């Protein structure tokens, strides 16, 4: 309802109130003395004053006096005033109406101000909650624009600057932007910290303590109270922006740091894996070159064998590295074929023959294990990596067991050693490239390198699994590969 | 170079290394030189062999399956002064410095040629014999130091050294053929409070070399081990 309509209604209400009072007075005037009827009218005036303010109450008091005079004072049904006391009544009506009307009007103003400020506070509260929970830098200006649009009822645009350049409109609330580029330029270059107007827009600066981020443009002029409130909202948004920026910076730093860590851990692991066989090769060949004459023929042969074996080992490491790159880039193409697991196991053992150094190797592949639909070379590599670890961790004269059996819809292949075992808390971690690489050059985990990660990648490509289990009788470790059995269709 | 000409031959050398192939060529080459070779795959076994067989030298791989090489040195040094040469694929200076600070005498980075290792072995063995002899007169390749009279001569000509310069030279002589880290030298010559003031050492070393007429690019007496420390070169 508009203000003038409200006012008309208030005056109409005042007239109606007087009408009701007249009706009541007709009902009551036989029961009460004449003078007391004026009290009835006074009550009516007071009620109007309390409800509707000064103007209507004055109207009510004049109307009340006239009605009182017309209907209830002698001579009846004339406006003549016979008694001086009635003049006094009129005067009282007017004075009381003026005083109470004034009081009521003041009360109204205050109540409506309170309501207004309460609403503003709750909006501010909502806004600051939005600001403090804003997840990203982009959410802050958007929330600010929407809040300003709602609370001011004006069109609001947010212009954001990219690295100090002239900002461009990023959010529009209320209506599409009609700012001209040169006006934006002017507003941006002035970089005033106080709000400033370029008619018909008012601009506010959006800034963190580190940099000026952009502008808020509001359509039309604002009064000083609105200016202050918008200014403080912009400052609040600035603080929120600062916070989201810091969070984003931190996150970025963390990612960079972790990548850096992973890279250096991988490099150190790779260099260990490559240099160890190289050390044997260079050591053996220089021994032959320098002291060949004083070395017995058997020892010379042994040194040459070392060179061959270690070269093969180096080749395995390089193959591992290549495989890992392919797994990492998702470029691993399976060339599946029907493969007899016996062949895969014996070929894997063959490749490591020279590394067994007197360890006892037991093979127990159940005859009933069906042919597997796999990429044989990859599963062989997975087995080689598991065996490599088993050898590394076995005590002297230890026993390594390779066993396989069909178990429902899958085949289980176990590689068990009698080494120190893996604590339960680490059994999943050892497959993590980062974990094994980090611990790869030191102590117990030396040389695990990337083998297990690669093993899991290869078996995973076959929709199988690799897990680390406790060895039989709680001794050592069993690594279990599970591969699905396919029908020969 | 023919085997057996070395007076250090017949020395017992313990190899602590988990790589069978490396142990193999070390054993063959060392035996070809007449050394007696003991082998251990694990750190604990190595410590036990040190105690039971009293080797003259230990060749230690830093990356053992059961024990970190640094811990091995620390535990060995609790009761033995046997010289230790460290083998490591870790090329980083800080690892070497840690091993030397823990008490290793020298290091060789894998991969290495057998000549390099043999030279270090001879040098360390000679150094430990010199230490045991503790003669008041030190002599090597024209450098003469009379530890009693505090007199230094280069090629017969007397050299006057300041107190600190002499201290530095004496420290290197008392650990012949052993790499002394910057921190070790600073601690000994200046005291523990100054052990990070590497530039003191650089300046003093420059002065000492100048007085000994030692060219750092072709050192006769004091060899720089880049990023680690210094070693006194010993010639018979």
Image (cartoon, coloured by chain):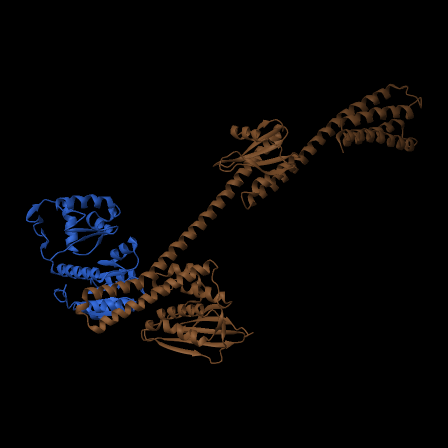
Q: Say which colour chain B has.
A: blue
The quarter holding residue B132 reads bottom left
Query: A24 left or right of B151?
Result: right
Q: Quadrant of the N terminus of chain A?
A: top right
Instruction: Tell whether B188 sits left or right of A37.
Output: left
A76 lies above or below B5: above
Residue B172 appearing in the image: yes
**Residue in front for this viewpoint, A267 or A49:** A267
Chain A color in figure: brown
Residue B55 visible: no
Horizontal and vertical percent position of residue B116: 21, 59
**Quarter of the image where the C terminus of chain A is located:** bottom right
Nearest the eye: B168 or A328: A328
Instruction: Tell me the residue at 25%/52% (across/down).
Output: B228
| Residue A268 against residue B43 in the figure, above or below | above
Determine whether B93 is above or below A415 in the image.
Answer: above
Q: Residue A92, percent across and down? A: 81, 23
Q: Which of the 4 quarters of the picture holds residue A51?
A: top right
Vertical position of residue A204 compared to residue B15: above or below: above
Image location (x, y in percent) of residue A453: 43, 63
Toward the viewer: A421 or A105?
A421
In percent of width and height, residue A254 lies at 45, 50
Q: Residue at x 63, y 38 (%)?
A: A173
In the rendered structure, the answer to whether residue B105 lies left or right of residue A412 reads: left
């Amino acid at each position: 309802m508009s203000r003038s309509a409200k006012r008309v209604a208030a005056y109409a209400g005042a007239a109606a109130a007087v009408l009701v009072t007249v009706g009541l007075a007709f009902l009551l005037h036989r029961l009460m003395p004449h003078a007391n009827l004026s009290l009835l009218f006074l009550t009516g005036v007071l009620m109007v004053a309390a409800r509707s303010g000064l103007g209507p109450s004055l109207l009510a008091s004049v109307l009340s006096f006239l009605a009182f005079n017309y209907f209830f004072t002698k001579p009846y049904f004339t406006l003549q005033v016979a008694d001086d006391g009635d003049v006094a009544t009129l005067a009282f009506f007017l004075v009381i109406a003026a005083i109470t009307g004034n009081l009521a009007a003041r009360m109204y103003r205050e109540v409506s101000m309170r309501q207004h400020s309460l609403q503003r506070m709750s909006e501010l509260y909502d806004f600051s909650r939005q600001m403090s929970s804003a997840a990203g830098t982009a959410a802050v200006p958007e929330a600010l624009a929407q809040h300003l649009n709602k609370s001011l009822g004006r069109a609001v645009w947010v212009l954001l600057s990219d690295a100090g350049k002239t900002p461009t409109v990023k959010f529009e609330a209320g209506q599409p932007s009609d700012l001209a580029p040169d006006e934006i330029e002017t507003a941006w270059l002035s970089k005033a910290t106080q709000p400033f107007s370029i008619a018909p827009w008012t601009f506010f600066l959006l800034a963190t303590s580190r940099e000026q981020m952009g502008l808020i443009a509001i359509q039309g002029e604002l009064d000083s109270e609105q200016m202050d409130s918008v200014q403080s909202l912009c400052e609040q948004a600035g603080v929120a922006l600062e916070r989201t920026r810091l969070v984003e910076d931190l996150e970025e730093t963390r990612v960079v740091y972790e990548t850096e860590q992973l890279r250096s851990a991988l490099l150190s692991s790779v260099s260990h894996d490559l240099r160890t066989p190289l050390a044997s090769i260079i050591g053996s060949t220089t021994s032959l070159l320098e002291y060949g004459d004083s070395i017995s023929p058997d020892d010379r042969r042994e040194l040459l064998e070392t060179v061959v074996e270690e070269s093969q080992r180096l080749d395995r490491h390089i193959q591992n590295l290549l495989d890992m790159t392919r797994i990492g880039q998702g470029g691993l193409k399976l060339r599946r074929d029907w493969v007899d697991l016996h062949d895969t196991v014996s070929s894997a053992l063959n490749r490591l023959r020279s590394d067994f150094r007197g360890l006892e190797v037991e093979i127990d592949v159940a005859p009933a294990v069906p042919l597997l639909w796999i990429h044989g070379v990859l599963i062989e590599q997975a087995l080689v990596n598991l065996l490599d670890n088993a050898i590394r961790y076995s005590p002297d004269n230890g026993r390594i067991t390779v066993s396989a059996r069909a178990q429902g819809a899958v085949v289980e292949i176990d590689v068990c050693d009698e080494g120190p075992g893996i604590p339960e808390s680490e059994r999943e971690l050892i497959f993590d490239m980062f974990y094994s690489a980090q611990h790869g050059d030191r102590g117990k985990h030396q040389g695990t390198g990337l083998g297990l990660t690669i093993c899991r990648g290869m078996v995973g490509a076959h929709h199988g699994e690799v897990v680390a289990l406790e060895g039989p009788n709680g001794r050592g470790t069993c690594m279990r590969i599970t591969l699905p059995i396919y029908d020969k269709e | 170079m023919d085997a057996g000409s070395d007076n250090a031959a017949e020395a017992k050398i313990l190899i602590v290394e988990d790589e069978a192939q490396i142990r193999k060529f070390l054993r063959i080459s060392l035996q070809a030189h007449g050394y007696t070779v003991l082998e251990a795959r694990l750190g604990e076994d190595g410590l036990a062999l040190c105690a039971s067989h009293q080797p003259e030298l230990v060749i230690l791989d830093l990356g053992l399956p059961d024990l970190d090489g640094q811990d091995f040195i620390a535990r060995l040094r609790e009761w033995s002064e046997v010289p230790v040469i460290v083998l490591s694929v870790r090329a980083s200076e800080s690892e070497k410095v840690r091993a030397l600070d823990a008490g290793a005498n020298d290091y060789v980075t894998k991969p290495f040629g057998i000549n390099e290792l043999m030279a270090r072995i001879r040098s360390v063995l000679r150094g430990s014999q010199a230490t045991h002899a503790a003669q008041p007169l030190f002599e090597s390749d024209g450098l003469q130091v009379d530890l009693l009279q505090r007199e230094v001569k280069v090629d017969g000509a007397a050299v006057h050294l300041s107190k600190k310069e002499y201290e530095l030279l004496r420290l290197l002589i008392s650990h012949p053929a052993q790499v002394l880290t910057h921190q070790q030298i600073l601690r000994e010559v200046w005291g523990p409070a100054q052990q990070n003031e590497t530039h003191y050492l650089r300046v003093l070393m420059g002065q000492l070399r100048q007085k000994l007429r030692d060219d750092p690019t072709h050192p006769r007496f004091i060899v720089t081990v880049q990023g680690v420390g210094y070693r006194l070169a010993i010639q018979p």
